[in-house]
Image: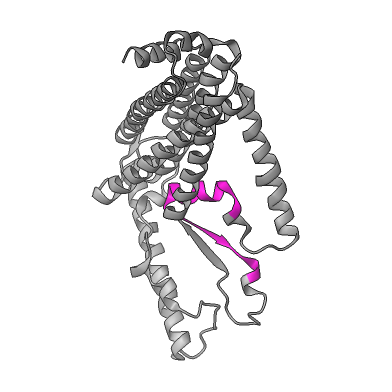
Amino acid sequence: MNLVRAELERLGARRFVQLMMVLLVLAFGVTAATTLAGSHRPTASELSEARSQAAQARQQLELSYQRCVDQVNGTLAPGVEREYFPENCSELDPGRMERLPVATDFLTGVFTFDQQARPLLYFLIAFLVLFGFLVGASYIGADLNSGGVVNLLLWRPRRLTVLGAKLGTLLGAVLVLSLLASAAYLATFWVIGQTAGLPGRLDGEFWRGLGAIHGRGMVLVLLASTLGFALATLGRHTSAALGAAAAYAVVWELGARLVLEIVDAARPDQLMLSSHIGAWLSGEARFWDARACLNSGTGFCDGSYTLTWAPALAVLLGLTAVLAVAAFTTFRRRDLI
């Protein structure tokens, strides 16, 4: 416990950590202020007009579905022009759609919490992932570069225990901060929706979906913190983690993706870490494979494919585990001076 307490004090005293927390507060404040300034409570006439437009949009969906069914069955009324519809009219069935038009879709300048909560939460998770990676890298990288780890080992001469305490302290602190920031962040926008906009439909399904995204986001934040920590440990400097992340983004996510598209490789998106991150956060991600329809002739061809959260999580966990084990193994054996 003394070691963990000492590490918490060292982590909190770092200027870089304090700077990142200030930037976190500023980013949240600017987002909330911008949202508040651009929103207003809708008037009765605005709500009435929006409800009328939503009803017309739903009616149009019903008409499109019925025209598709009539065209497929050959029962179109005489004089009605044929239109392009998918072979399977169930794709146009309003009863099977995930979401139908509602009045809030047709309100301008009105913040609606149930519609904007997910994009706002994705923004929060992205910032916390960056926060965790940078703090994790700087936390161990600065100690290795300055000799602070050597001084700590004089007090507690067990390398793996010391490194494990540092990693555990980092993950615990980042998780607590992320949970507190998430609660304050979402509560702020909920209040904005109640006072200067509309709350929307906040039923159990909405909160379950939002909670699932938040839970997956917290896992991603912890994985990013561990990756930053492991890369900085392997490279013995904070810049090693930053360089590795930049090199991966430029060489693989940009360069290799371009090469794979030029050579017309099959399903290149599944080879990218960003695709697995998106699939994990959203539950699944859909991509397009152009090669799947090369020999389809003129018929309908669906060249899309999906990545689901389970294999995406396996990839993210596997990569993090390999780098973490390599970091601990290297730290145990190499000269630290």
Residue 316 visible at all: yes
Between 324 and 305, the one nearer to me in the picture: 324
Indicate whether residue 130 is drawn in magenta: no
Q: Position of residue 231 (x, y in %)?
A: 57, 30
Q: Quadrant of residue 241?
A: top right
Judge by depth and name the residue closer to the eye, 124 or 28: 124
What span is in magenta?
271-291
Q: Give the x, y percent position of residue 104.
A: 37, 49
- Quarter the C terminus occupies: top right
Q: State yes or no: residue 285 in magenta.
A: yes
Question: In this rendering, would 331 be left or right of 73?
Answer: right
- Image vertical order of residue 66 relative to residue 144, above or below: below
- Check the picture and name the quadrant holding the N terminus: top left
Residue 239: percent from the left, percent from the top?
Answer: 64, 24
**Residue farthest to the left?**
204
Q: Residue at point 60% right, 82% down?
A: 299
Say which of 89 and 210 sits in front: 210
Q: Residue at x 43, y 34 (%)?
A: 222
Q: Give the residue displayed 32% in from the left and 34% down from the top.
A: 190
Percent x, y of residue 18? 47, 14
Residue 201 appears in the figure = no
Colouring convention used in this rendered image of the protein: one colour
